[in-house]
Image: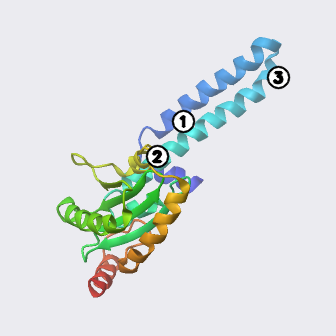
Amino acid sequence: MGQAFTLTRQNDSRLVPFLIIAFVVGAAVGFLAVYLPLSNVWIAILPALLVGVAAAMFIFSRRAQTSAYNQAEGQPGAAAYVLGQLRGDWHKTDAVAGNAQLDAIHRVLGRPGVVLIGEGAPNRVRPLLAQEKKRVARLAGDAPIYDLVVGRGEGEIPLGKLNVHIMKLPRNLSKEQVVALDRRLAALGAQRMPIPQGPMPTGAKMRGVQRAARRRG
């Protein structure tokens, strides 16, 4: 917890003020909720402290997550890591397509249909997306296929909003249809590309992964 606080504070100058505000507001709400019906200050103090701490912890977790996403954005493997935190019945396959520059296409299958997510340089990712969409379409039948590019440009999805965007997609398939489609798409997983398991820094380690990708490409 201490390390997470230190790292978040280094990248979020407003963290401490927001925590203080959250604690004060939460404590005030907790105090009034107990004091007004009981009219006893001492009984109201403990609930006020608990609510204040809970409010501050909630704000801290949200801002720590946002800070982590901001630091990871643009690094190879960041989208795959974030997609791994999707809640619910999703079938995720990392790096179903990619290149030696570590641009990658990830596939997520769920009730909305097939979602293809590209991360990397947009000018290289979009052709990869188009090619992968054609491959998937041969087996997807009538299932919708969505294609997304992670980034900050026009028409792109910021890393921190990726999972929320996917979760908001309309439910088009039944659970049975998802299972059947997952079986048909399993054969495409044989062409997966190697990618980092989570965001990676630049340097020698990055160059080693790039060499591995070129050998596989």
Element assignment for label 3? helix
Residue 171's label in the rendered image is: 2
- Residue in view at x 45 percent, y 60 percent: 109
**Is disc 2 surrounded by few (<14), some (14 to 19) or many (20+) residues within 10 Å?**
few
Measured in 3D between alpha carbons, the distance from the residue under mark 3 to the one under mark 1, in whole angstroms, is 24 Å
- Residue 43 falls in which quadrant of the image? top right
Q: Which residue is mark 3?
A: 43
* Element at label 2: loop
Q: In the figure, 67 relative to 207: above or below?
A: above
Q: In the image, which is nearer the foreground, mark 2 or mark 3?
A: 2
Q: Position of residue 181 (x, y in %)?
A: 46, 64
Q: Which residue is mark 1?
A: 19
The first of marks 2 and 1 along the sequence is 1
Q: Is residue 158 above or below residue 125?
A: above
Question: x, y (%) of residue 8?
Answer: 47, 49
Q: Nearer the viewer, residue 51 or 156?
A: 156
- Relative depth, front residue between 89 and 102: 89
The residue at 30%/61% (across/down) is: 118
180 vs 99, left or right, is right
